[in-house]
Amino acid sequence: MQSIHGVDDRDREEKHEKHEYTENVPAYEDPFGNEEFAEVQYRTLRWWQCAMIMIAETISLGILSLPSAVAALGLAPAVILIVGLGIVATYTGYVIGQFKLRYPHVHSMADAGEVMLGRFGRELLGTAQLLFLVFIMGSHILTFIVMMNTVTDHGTCSIVFGVVGLVLSFVLTLPRTLKKVSWMSISSFISIVAAVLVTMIAIGIQRPGNGQVDATVKTNLYEGFLAVTNIVFAYAGHVAFFGFISEMKTPTDYPKTLYMLQITDTSMYVITAVVIYYYGGKDVKSPALGSTSPLIAKIAYGIAIPTIVIAGVINGHVACKYIYVRLFRGTGRMHKRNFLSLGTWVLIGLVLWTLAWIIAEAIPVFNNLLSLITALFASWFTYGMSGIFWLFLNWGRYTSSKRKIFLTVINAIIVGIGGCLCGLGLYVSGKALHDNPSSASFSCANNA
């Protein structure tokens, strides 16, 4: 069995070899330095706590769009894609762990970019990571607005709901360590499971789709690939994995956290998507919580409030931590509770959540925002970049054995998958935004 270091038993003798690009590797080895006497300690996560954070980050918005993806693609192709992309996401997540343990100083995609391409790689991947996280934060504020409009029957201006979501998310992002966030993640997981169960039970009783199932459907490239981007977004948590591993007590336990995540999310995705589609029919809504009666939709959204908020908070925490580590890495300020340290963290959070709110108000259509995020970022961070990481780790050994040849081909295909998802995804998301321009941008209109 291949070790997490990316070197199988037959290649262990080669582990002393240095990559030809190692001049790009910085001198520091750990993002948080020596924490023995630190006021604030970051490397405190047990593997199961890290797994709960990863589950809360991943299983949230994505699961709400899957039933409509099944309706657009047909039951058979959709299930194959959900399971298949889940398996690939498991492998690409594993490769991220390999890269992290080969280069322990890596805390973010920016650090990984610096290892491979120097300063240019750092700025390229760092900017992309930050934009991706802010877009995801915006999608959570958007879902919060939809939820509030549903629960209150559009009780007030949607912009007001957006500001409430901004303030709540900002306040919950104030803790600086992931261990504190991990306790919130447990309530997030319970929340989404309960909300999905309520939705499945209610829709099973009401049967708005009369149990009509299409194994395959006639579709076109635009509608079909728009549904594919929603499935890809459901696995779009990899961008934060480097940061999560960095705060684990024992980074070598990471595979256990990854497998717990992938078994949980893939199983929930298949069950939720199939059941809600089966009873909801071809007109099932996205987000899926709106597919039941108005009363049940309100109940389900109310139960889902913790996951809508906390999953966004986790992504917000990772975005803030990226900037915070970059500013204070190698200094004692990161571990202090003084005015400068705390004030910087607060200011970073306030700026990023304000940007997220602007995105939510500018693109107030749930599916369109998800497809745009997937095309620009998830295509690479969840799939394509991991293929590039593996090719970098194994440079010069692509044909050293039959196994290496096989893995080289697999990872080259994964890079191709990332490129395909990006190119076609930009086409369909751009067409969706063009064909369905929303007049509700920065408006008080009801977007539920």
Image: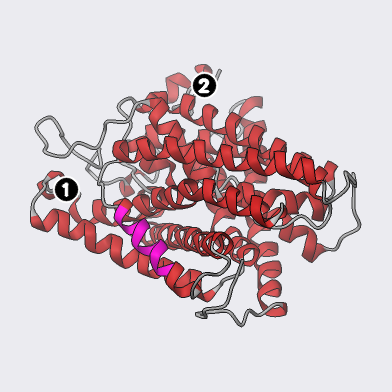
> In the image, is residue 169 part of the stretch drawn in magenta?
yes
Magenta range is 162-171
Q: CA distance from mark 1 to mark 2?
A: 37 Å
Q: Nearer the viewer, residue 322 or 22?
A: 322
Q: Please count the marks in the image.
A: 2
The location of residue 231, given as percent across then percent down, is 67, 49
The local secondary structure at tag 1 comes to helix
Q: How is the image coloured?
A: secondary structure
Q: Amino acid at mark 2?
A: Asp
Q: Main secondary structure of the magenta part?
A: helix
* Residue at the (58%, 28%) spot, across then down: 400
Q: Are marks 1 and 2 in contact (CB under 8 Å)?
A: no
Q: Is residue 252 visible?
A: yes
Q: Which residue position holds label 2?
A: 8
Q: Amino acid at mark 1?
A: Met
Q: Is residue 415 visible?
A: no
Left or right: 1, with 246 as reference point: right
